[in-house]
Amino acid sequence: MTATATLSSKFQISIPKVVREEQHWQAGQEFVFIPKGKGVLVMPVPSVSDLAGIARGARTEEVRDRKYRF
């Protein structure tokens, strides 16, 4: 899928219809922009219900405490 968009004078970009439909994105949906080298990754912000149970079954031994983080 190759689609392009142009940055407007108000620094807005319209997401092409083919991309919106492929990703099932809706008007009013919130997105996060993650810098990646010379580009940016655009991802929808997940809802709390989407995250429910995401850590189920995760190992809890050898978990670093906040004081050991860089």
Image (tube, rainbow, N blue to C red):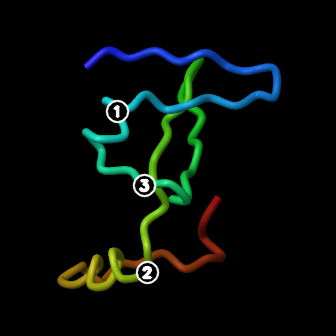
- Name the mark on residue 26: 3
CB contact under 8 Å: marks 2 and 3 = no
**Quadrant of the snapshot with the C terminus:** bottom right
All told, the count of numbered labels is 3
Q: Does residue 14 lie above or below 5 as drawn? A: below
Q: Which is nearer the N-term, disc 2 or disc 3?
A: 3
Q: Does residue 61 lie above or below 38 as drawn? A: below
Amino acid type at circle 1 is Val
Measuring from the top left, give residue 7's x and y in whole percent.
67, 19
Q: Quadrant of residue 19?
A: top left
Q: CA distance from mark 2 to mark 3?
A: 17 Å
**Quadrant of the snapshot with the N terminus:** top left
Residue at image point 26% right, 84% down: 53
Identity of the residue furthest to the right in this view: 10
CB contact under 8 Å: marks 1 and 2 = no
User: Could you tell me which secondary element the residue under label 3 belongs to?
Assistant: loop
**Residue in the foreground of this view, choosing between 25 and 43:** 25
Measuring from the top left, give residue 13's x and y in whole percent.
62, 29
- Name the mark on residue 41: none
Q: CA distance from mark 1 to mark 3?
A: 11 Å
Amino acid type at circle 3 is Gln
Disc 2 marks which residue?
Answer: 48
Residue at image point 48% right, 75% down: 64
Disc 1 marks which residue?
Answer: 19
Q: Using a 10 Å C-alpha cutoff, classify the residue at mark 1 as few (fewer than 14 neighbours), some (14 to 19) or many (20 or more).
A: some
**Residue in the foreground of this view, choosing between 38 and 42:** 42
- Please identify, in this view, whether the residue under mark 1 or under mark 2 is nearer the observer: 1
Identity of the residue furthest to the left in this view: 57
Compared across the picture, whether 13 is left or right of 23 comes to right
Amino acid type at circle 2 is Val
**Residue in the foreground of this view, choosing between 47 and 4:** 4
Q: Which is nearer the N-term, disc 1 or disc 3?
A: 1
